[in-house]
Image (tube, rainbow, N blue to C red):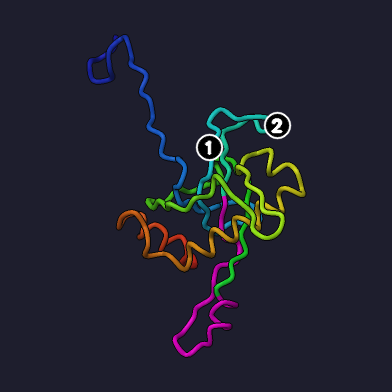
Amino acid sequence: DHSPLFGSEEEEEVKMGKFLKQGRVVIILRGRFAGRKAIIVKTFDEGAGPRKFGHCLVAGIDIPPKKITRAMSEKMVKKRSTIRPFVKAINYNHLMPTRYRADLELKNLETTGDDATKFKLDEEALNDPSTRLLVKKAVKKVLETGYFAQNKRKNAKMEEGVKYFYQKLRF
């Protein structure tokens, strides 16, 4: 007694498109960083390792840059433009995707100084405490250079996404 309005006997399985991809700007909804913006670095749809649920690695801004004016000195501008980053693995349920995408290169990082090293931002890097500190420093460098080069993006869409990412969230 099925009516044709509710579909046929053989129902087709509808595949959802992936929208939580690398580069998507998201807002974190739960936990210590609730209300902060972040960029997806890597996704794990089926879960991996100790996390048996869909999650992703995000890198975001814990403390955003403060407002600067033309009258401020170069030293003051540099001080007020510092960013405190965070890097975290977060469950998909605790993220709210935005329409924006940012083209900041956060997957392959490198540290500067006398002990310059290159590494990938992945779960192993987050699990080791010494590497985690290096990762945060490298992410801070990428985010701060991106902050000063907001208008030097591939296209207008990415430029708009990066601009949104660096603005403080008002709610």
Label number found at residue 106: none
Residue farthest to the left, as pictured: 4
In this rendering, the answer to whether 111 lies above or below 53 is below
Quarter of the rendering occupied by the N terminus: top left
Name which residue type carries label 2: Pro
Q: Is residue 171 visible?
A: no
How far is the residue under mark 1 from the one under mark 2?
15 Å
Instruction: Name the residue rendered at 50%, 78% in the picture.
Output: 67
Residue farthest to the front, as pictured: 114
In this rendering, the answer to whether 77 lies above or below 6 is below
Answer with the quarter of the image where residue 49 lies. Answer: top right
Instruction: Name the residue rendered at 37%, 32% in the picture.
Output: 17
For label 2, count other residues whose C-alpha is less than 10 Å away and answer few (under 14), some (14-19) or many (20+).
Answer: few
* Residue 65 place in picture, x, y as percent: 54, 71
Taking the image as shown, residue 154 lies to the left or right of residue 25, namely left
Between residue 144 and residue 63, name the one nearer to us: 144
For label 1, count other residues whose C-alpha is less than 10 Å away and answer few (under 14), some (14-19) or many (20+).
Answer: some
* Residue 54 place in picture, x, y as percent: 56, 33
Answer with the quarter of the image where residue 138 lies. Answer: bottom right
In this rendering, the answer to whether 101 lies above or below 16 is below
Magenta span: 59-80
Q: Secondary structure at mark 1?
A: strand
Q: Earlier in the sequence, mark 1 or mark 2?
A: 1
Label number found at residue 43: 1
Instruction: Name the residue rendered at 70%, 31% in the picture.
Output: 50
Q: Is residue 107 visible?
A: yes
Q: Secondary structure at mark 2?
A: loop
* Residue 94 place in picture, x, y as percent: 56, 46
Taking the image as shown, residue 64 lies to the left or right of residue 161, namely right
Q: Is residue 169 magenta?
A: no
Instruction: Tell me the residue that label 2 is attached to.
Output: 50
Taking the image as shown, residue 100 lies to the left or right of residue 110, namely left
